[in-house]
Image (tube, helix red, strand yellow):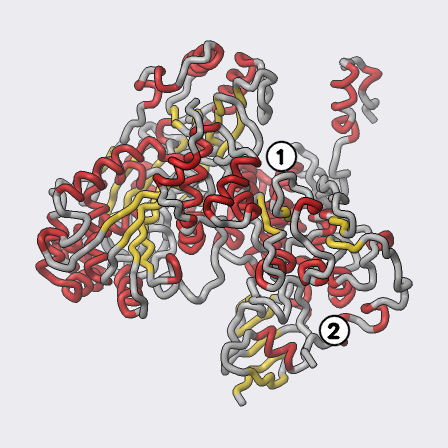
Amino acid sequence: MKTFTLDGREVPFSEGQTVLQAALADAVYVPHLCAHPEFKPHGSCRVCTVKANGRMAASCTLAAREGLTIESETEEVRELRRELVQLLFVEGNHFCPSCEKSGDCKLQAVGYQLEVKTLHFTQLFPDRPVDASHPELLLDFNRCILCELCVRASAEVDGRNVFALSGRGIDKHLIVNAESGKLADTSIAVTDTAVAVCPVGVILKKGRGFAVPIGQRTFDRAPIDALSEKKP
Amino acid sequence: MHTLDLPSLLARHRNDPTRLVQILRGVQQAAGWISPPTITELAGRLGLPRARVEGVAGFYSFFCTSPRGEYRVLFSDSITDQLLGSRELRARLCTALQVREGEVRNDGRVSVDLTSCTGLCEQGPALLLNGRAIARLTPARIDELAQRIEARQPLDSWPAELFAIQDVVHRPDVLLGSTLARGEAIRAALARGPEGTLEQVLRSKLRGRGGAGFSTAEKWKAAKAAPGPTRFVVCNADEGEPGTFKDRVLLHRHLDLVLDGMTACALAIGAQRGFIYLRGEYLFLEASIEAALAARREAHLLGTDLLGRRGFDFDVELHLGAGAYVCGEESALIESLEGKRGIPRSRPPYPVTHGYLQQPTVVNNVETFASAALIALHGGDWFAGIGTPKSSGTRVHSVSGDCARPGLYEFPMGVTVKDLLDASGATDVQAVQVGGPSGVLLSPQEFSRRLSFEDLPSAGAFMIFDARRDLLEVVQNFAHFFAHESCGFCTPCRVGTTQLRNSLDAIAASRGTRRDVKVALRLAKLMRETSHCGLGHTACNPFLALHEKFKPTLDRRLSSLDFLPTFDLDDALAPAREVTGRDDRAAHLEES
């Protein structure tokens, strides 16, 4: 089996795997938000940055190969990741205590893993109205981190193309596939993978709030780096 | 304004979804904006998800997804235009037309806004009016524009002189002085054959003129060797780096040289199709390029069996951009050519193996192809004999800013900064920005450095700032540019460019602290190390140079305090004052 080195440990990989995929498959956690085992990696959030043979790279798009020496949990790398997460926080409007996704939110969980204690940067407080048009689903764009997982899931798994991105730069934003711009006018179904895949609290099911009490939620039970995303 | 006939517009583009950016340009031109029902209809007819079409329309800054003025004025926000008084001229136009910047006048007649550098820096200030460039603005010209807009004169009836663009060449050399006849270089390449042509390009040591300086022969060889049923040759004429305008002149005066170079490349790598990706700001070149392409087809220099050689087929299509600097990055350019948002791809794989439609593709700069044509004709050794050992050939420098003679200067590689300053008649120079905002800001101690790959690589821009100028204003302008042009794909560049812009705005308004500088320095490191493409890697260069080389300029604006509120309370009351129509003392917070 071919291997590369990650923080001094030999990580096996198979042909075609990325560094992140190989690490997760070997139960080595590397923080990530836009990467997901079901979807082709595209490398936009950069939170999975590692130092590979002396250069920073996004591990989700870096092809695993022999001879790679990866630094992951060093303070140098963690500081960059922390700042990236801080940028994601100041870009949107994230009020964890009042968010239905608190405790199940990957942004929050990665924030804890990286020991984010302040926002460090200046908050942008964007104006992002919610879309409550759909009878069963709510879109709260304030929490969107533009990971494109819903875009990919709706196109590749659900076959509906409900979501896409528009705008550019800091004005980049999630849109839905309807002339009215409203989710109610799309073909989305509550059972869509696009609904379930949202790592933060943008796509929420109506009519069921706080079903699991805070304190008993996914990342309340165990921190995100204790979880493996390996399929059974 | 013309009326929009979607079916015939689509027919002109063969209902081809890869031509979506071109189709949206057509809609924008005919209707003045791209309405939601139009997007729905377009998506239906092209068989694309509606949201995908909306996403493309929302990406490019020349596309409007909400109504704009019947006359849409976009002032070039290049720093050189700003130094020439563009802000005052903008204010003058707004006052004359009673319109507020960034807004549409109540009657829908006009809107006035900003756009990134329009590539007319040597004849600025400039603006775009419904996509058409107007240069050499003066107060008198502004007043004339205001009158014509107020009188609602159709643009086609305006005097052509208003839209005239000059080619300002002060020092031609082998490229700008070329008198090569159309097709001459192709004949020479045919005589040498594909391998022989490639061999000459290799011997010439030609390196790409777009900025990265990759070996042209290596690129061509890789594309030739890559498996694929078809290959493509793309000319990158998306000259978006502020301060650069050499490609504009090369495409106007020496288009046949560029096309000969593209055709020689097609012969060398075995490509049948090519594209010129022209930045949307250079719309005024569209007609002459289309005419030249038609003339070449007529002369059997494009099409099938070129120059009577059986099986030597090659044709070139013109694509126009729509206001996106990032499309100058080759993989983003290819995405745009495919009718998508201009997001740089993850690499590897590189365009030479997986480019346009995932086929092997050579993307070279305009100047690179023009040089390649000369190499095909005169041979590689001739070219390698010009310039320095590692930087062969000449370089066309776009000189703008504070000098007596702004314009183009073609010099052999290796000329010093001082040589160029002397040639252009610059005096009392405080700093020079080489290679545009993503390049380097030089202080006078560095003026003996040589413009070459060994020392000081450049994408061709050379902006001069004399002692009167406030460099903080220059760096602030560049920060606004990058924030406006970030594609938004990756976190560090998307949020970082905006953070940096806000910090510099605060510092320029004397509301910045040492902490702002410290945060900006960390941000610079983060963006350089973790961004997805070159835009994010280089966006902080101007700020870093200011901090490193011109620290007093930065420091004298900083508050001595460690902390200041990021907003001004009195400023925050401005909207309330406006609503109530008050501006008396009691409507302001007391000075503490």
Label 2 amino acid? Asp
Q: Secondary structure at mark 1?
A: helix
Callout 2: SS: helix
Q: Is residue B430 above or below residue B16?
A: above
Q: Position of residue A225 (x, y in %)?
A: 74, 73
Q: Given the image, what chain letter belongs to the residue carrying mark 2?
A: A
Q: Residues within 10 Å of mark 1 (few under 14, many from 20)?
A: some
> Who is closer to the viewer here, B177 or B262?
B262
- Determine the image quadrant of residue A84: bottom right
As drawn, the label of residue A225 is 2
Compare residues A81 and B485 and report the one nearer the observer.
Answer: B485
Does residue B362 lie above or below B482 as drawn? below
Residue depicted at x 34% and y 22%: B163
Q: What numbered label is drawn on residue B450?
A: none
Q: Quadrant of residue A230?
A: bottom right
Which label number is shown at residue B508? 1
Is residue B475 depicted above or below A84 in this figure? above
- The answer to whether residue A218 is seen in the rendering is yes
Q: Give the residue type that dot 1 points to.
A: Ala
Whether A57 is drawn above or below B299: the answer is: below
